[in-house]
Each structure stands twice: as structure tokens, then as C-alpha cells.
Image (cartoon, rainbow, N blue to C red):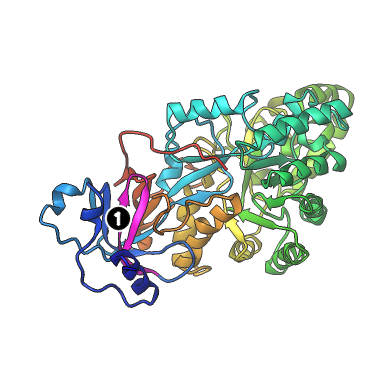
Amino acid sequence: MTIRPIVICLLGLLLLGGCAKTPSPFLAEYASIDLLIENGLVLDGLGGAAQAADIVVVGDKIVFVGDAQFTDSNFDTRVNKRIDANGRTITPGFIDLHAHGNPLATPEFENFLAMGVTTIALGQDGSSPEVTDLAAWMDQVASNGIGPNLVMFVGHGTLRALSGIGRVQVPGPDDLERMLEILDTSLKLAFGMSTGLEYNPGLNAQRQELLALAKVVGRNDRMIMSHMRNEDDDQLENSIAELLDQGRHARVHVSHLKSVFGKGAQRAQEILGILASARKSGIEVTAGVYPYNASYTAIDIVFPVWAKTVEQFEVAKVQRRDELAEYLRNRVNRRNGPEATLLGTEPYTGMTLAELADKLETPFEDVLIDVIGPAGAKGAYFVMNDELQTRLMADPLVGICSDGDPTGFHPRGHGTFAKIIERYVMRDKVFTLPEAVHKMTSFAAGILGITDRGVVREGMIADLLIFDPARVHATATYPDPLQLATGFDVVIINGKVARENNQLADGLFGSVLHP
């Protein structure tokens, strides 16, 4: 049996011995080559050291990684696009485990492409498009076009809405069965179910309901992506335990793992120890972290359960005004005070709650009641500890997510993946570059269940980045959070150059992915 030169080449690479100088087989095998990337340092996404290599792409697939050695005299006319990496790093495209946005409103998602993200996971925190035909919605997204690849989750809150349960605490048997049927159907298209147990209507869900849903998720070999019930440090163990309970039936993932009020690496180690013990017991649990010390969500996060909805709030404002004011005062002060809440919604954008209260000459709790209300703003909340979050992030079984979107007033949506390289690799040496790339590519793909992306290898889809790590810069800041990241020179999605030299290409090349 004759061993083809490609196989010889691959074996040589595996032995770190390179390839013999034999003519490239590609011009004989393919009428044309869509993309050739030469002279790169390839990090394959699996955590190993970089290797000098060329990459050949035909259609949307990588067909060769190694020394391409083109010798054909018609070479230049047979390669549709040729890129000289000139010693820059080539990696798989980054995969954002937890993102937000409406692909029908902002299909380009340039904020993600600019920081090297080629695949985003939407439908988070229990909320996905409230449509009765998810397949039709996904087809519409595909037809309209999308910049990055799209992974969809079906939201638990959305399931409650579609099944008529809404905010009921304990659904009746028929309603529960209807919700389970909708979930089962949705999981033919979605990579899993997301929960947002700190938000309405998810906060109403009880154990029996969550376990019933988890069994359906597990039966379909999907995962539960959870914004847990309470991220406050003194409630964190209970929240994790609730998710691990579901993890006896399905794979589970802690979205944007954090400890509100928690401090120090030791506390992080305690949290990681809980997850490690669960894994040893056979529960498949992972987590994601973003590299910022402020969260970002609706202002109702500081309101009590009995005043979160507009209807509840209007009643509480009249009947329980003093109690509500005291609750808000205590809650906000515990969350580092009104100075630690940066509002991100007009007409308050860029002001802290303290600054708004000073401007109005009104106590901040009264501003929350009389001016903003639970539905009147979103904000960034500086409630996390850098040392604790960095230790969480460094754990090899914790991935990276942005929890960001194209328009949110928080730098994570434009800076997360660039900041990982700029600060945590290049400056602080929290990870090596291969380790960081692994977290953001093949590890993330494994969490989601994506099998054909996240690794630079023959046969994989060509989602690729070309960049110089020393030039990557997260320009987004809290005062100016919508600045695009810089330094990712070439972003390739499904074999096509989607962004190059800080400019979007003509066309949207992402795909709507299916499990």
C-alpha cells in the first residue's frame, strides 16, 4: 500500500521532524485552492507549542497543515487567495461560550469578530427567541446572513412562556408536560437549555421542574448552561448545589462564574474544589469566566423578588414603600455602594447611581423607586474581586466567555478575548499563549459539543485567526465600552476572510450550527 505524501508529512510533523522536500500534492488533487496561509506559527488549539506551518484551505475545510512546498509553475493562478503570515500566530477562531445579541438586528456582530471570536452561543440566561417555530427562526437567520457562527440554546424562561406557565411557581401536570415536549423538540436544533434563575420567570422554578427538564436535556445528550439562582458569596454553595443536582441527569455549565462580595484566591479555590469534587463523582460540570470585575445586567438585580416586575413594583411602591426603600439601601450598600453601579441606559448612560442621586439631590434608594424602577435601566456593577476572579479563570477546566453584546455599556462585549491575551498572557503571565488559546478554542468547542471546529487540523472547518500576540489590544473601557479590539489582523470564518486589517469583508460568512 502506498502511503501518500500528505500522510508522510503529518507523521513528520508529529515527530517534530518536518517533511522531506517533495513536491506538494495539492495541485494534482484539487483544481484550485481557495486559501493558502504561508509562514505561520500554528497553535492548533490543543495546548501544545506552536509549530511553523502553512495551511491549505479548500472550500470551508482545512485540507493540509505543514510545509506545503508548492512547486507547480502555475501556482499563483491556481490559488484563489494567498496570505503570508510572516511569522505571526495562527490559531483556531475563538468560541464565546456565553454571548448576547439579536442576529436579525445586528447580523455583523463586528464586536465579536474584532476580538477574534468566530462562534457565539446565544439564547442565554433563560431567554431565547419567543417563537413557536425555532427552526423557521434559525432558517431566517441563516438566510439573512450572520457574521460569526451561531450556536443556539433554548431558554428555560422562554419555555415557560411558550407553555403558558409564565411566572407560576409550580406548573400543573399538563403545563409541565407541554414545556417538556417543547424542550424535547427544541433540542433537535439547540445545543442545550439555558436557565436564568436570578431573573423572572426562572426564579419561580422549583426543584421538581428543574429536574424534569434536566432529564429531557440529558436524554438528548445536550447541556444546561446556567445563570445560577444567586451569585452572592454567602449563597454561592447553595446555587452550585442546585445546578449539580441537575447535573446528575445532564451535563451542566456555570455561566460567568463569579462570587459577588467574595475575596481572595483561597475563596476561589474553595469554589473550584466544589466543582472538582462533583467531577470526581461523575457529574460533567464546567464553567466560564469573563476578565472583568463588574457584572452587567438590568437594574432589577437590586430589587427584591416581590418588586421585580413592573406590576409587583407598582404595588410595592404604594403598599410597602418604606420596606422597599430599606431593602434597596441595604442591598446597594452591600454591593459596594451606589458609586459601584455604573448606569448604561439613556438618559443616565455613563453616570453612577451616586452621581445621579447627587444631581437630583435625592437619596439613591428614592432615585431607584421614583426615577428608574426595576425596568428602567441596565448597569455595570463593580462587585467582584480581581484576585478571586483571576484564580477562577486560571483553572484548566474553566473556559472564557464574554457575556457581552454589540450594544451593551460594558467593555466585556468588545474586549474580553483581546484582554485575555493582552493582560493575562502577555502582561500578567496567568496563562501561556497555548493555554489561553486552548481555553478559547478546542476546550470551548468540547464544552458545547462542537466537533468540527476549534482545532487547526486536516478535515476541520477553517475558522482561523492570524495575529501578533504582542499587538493585541482591548481598547474598550468602562467610560467608552464600544471600542473595537485591535490586533487580530485576519479573521477567517468557514474558509473565507471575514475581517482583515480592521475592515469587514463584503459578505457575512457565519453559519447557523446544529448539534
In the displayed structure image, the side of residue 355 where residue 167 appears, left or right:
right
Residue drawn at point x = 60 percent, y = 63 percent: 390
Residue 144 occupies which quadrant of the picture?
top left
The segment highlighted magenta reads: 50-66
Residue 189 occupies which quadrant of the picture?
top right
Residue 41 visible, this angle: yes
- Was residue 57 drawn as part of the magenta stretch in this picture? yes
In the displayed structure image, the side of residue 398 where residue 38 appears, left or right:
left
| x and y, in percent, of residue 137 in the image | 55, 26
In this view, the residue in front, 500 or 485, is 500
Q: Secondary structure at mark 1?
A: strand
Q: Main secondary structure of the magenta part?
A: strand
**Quadrant showing the N terminus:** bottom left
Residue drawn at point x = 74 percent, y = 26 percent: 161
| x and y, in percent, of residue 325 in the image | 82, 34
Amino acid type, label 1:
Val
In this view, the residue in front, 327 or 304, is 304
